[in-house]
């Protein structure tokens, strides 16, 4: 399925839906969008709040699978109910990214997201932009189960991580550096 973009080009229908509790979360979540774009995964981003727009969140979750989405990433801070409410209305996997936006610096959102009652899982990531990047990678891993190209992309990603760590070893002063 394809749909039109503003430029009039045809784009693939999104497979990953990113939902932000507020546009103020975008700065932390942008790294996830960069990664999905770099890896050629079709995604969409919208704002919906379980507290401020409960009907919109419910509609998004209920329509997600029918619109072709395969994974939902939900980023929210403070009393973060967004991921859980989305998960309650869809059988798609929901990945939650707690945002460090409140005066409790995200401990509140982390606990709100991770402490889901049995029966309604939310795959909760690390706080902030590291969690957002990991959410994109986890989404890619889910899609890769049925996508050989993505499996190769993920293998290259792992190899790059390894190379980077091995290079970092050179930054340790030689007099202390292990041969390992
Ligand atoms: P504003 O900056 O808009 O006041 O939002 C947002 O994700 C954001 O981190 C402050 C914080 O409130 C969060 N928020 C939620 C939900 N809706 C908004 N946690 C929700 O539905 O859970």
Image (tube, rainbow, N blue to C red):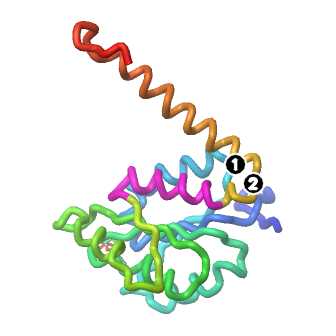
Query: Residue 66: percent from the left, percent from the top?
Result: 72, 81
The answer to whether residue 70 shows anywhere in this view is yes
Q: Which residue is labeled 1 in the image?
A: 150
Secondary structure state at the residue bearing disc 2: loop
Q: Name the foreground residue: 55 vs 86.
A: 86
Which residue shows up at 70% across the image and 61% down it? 6
Q: Is residue 159 left or right of residue 120?
A: right
Placement of 58 over or under 176, stated as above or below:
below
Query: Residue 37: percent from the left, percent from the top?
Result: 62, 49
Which residue shows up at 38% across the image and 85% down it? 117
Judged by its main secondary structure, the magenta piece is helix
Alpha-carbon span between mark 2 and mark 1: 5 Å
The quadrant where ligand 1 appears is: bottom left
Q: Which residue is labeled 2 in the image?
A: 147
Location of the C terminus by quadrant is top left
Q: Which mark is residue 80?
A: none
Query: Residue 178: percent from the left, percent from the top?
Result: 31, 16
Location of the N terminus by quadrant is bottom right
Circle 2 packing at 10 Å, graded few (<14), some (14-19), many (20+), is few
Q: Is mark 1 within 8 Å of ligand 1?
A: no
Does the magenta segment cover residue 76?
A: no
Magenta highlight range:
126-142
Which residue shows up at 27% across the image and 64% down it? 101
Residue, far left? 103
Which residue shows up at 40% across the image and 56% down it? 131
Q: Is residue 93 left or right of residue 149?
A: left
């Amino acid at each position: 399925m394809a749909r039109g973009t503003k430029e009039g080009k045809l784009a693939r229908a999104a497979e990953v839906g990113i939902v932000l509790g507020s546009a103020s979360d975008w700065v932390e979540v942008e790294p996830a969008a960069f990664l999905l774009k770099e890896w050629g995964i079709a995604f969409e981003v919208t704002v919906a709040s379980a507290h401020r727009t409960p009907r919109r969140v419910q509609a998004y979750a209920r329509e997600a699978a029918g619109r072709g989405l395969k994974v939902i990433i939900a980023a929210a801070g403070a009393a973060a109910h967004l991921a859980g409410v989305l998960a309650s209305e869809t059988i798609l996997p929901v990945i939650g990214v707690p945002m460090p936006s409140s005066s409790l610096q995200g401990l509140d959102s982390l606990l709100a997201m991770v402490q889901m009652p049995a029966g309604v899982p939310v795959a909760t990531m690390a706080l902030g932009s590291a969690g957002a990047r990991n959410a994109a990678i986890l989404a890619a891993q889910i899609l890769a189960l049925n996508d050989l190209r993505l499996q190769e992309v993920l293998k290259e990603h792992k190899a790059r991580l390894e190379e980077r760590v091995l290079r970092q070893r050179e930054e340790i002063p030689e007099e202390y550096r292990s041969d390992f």
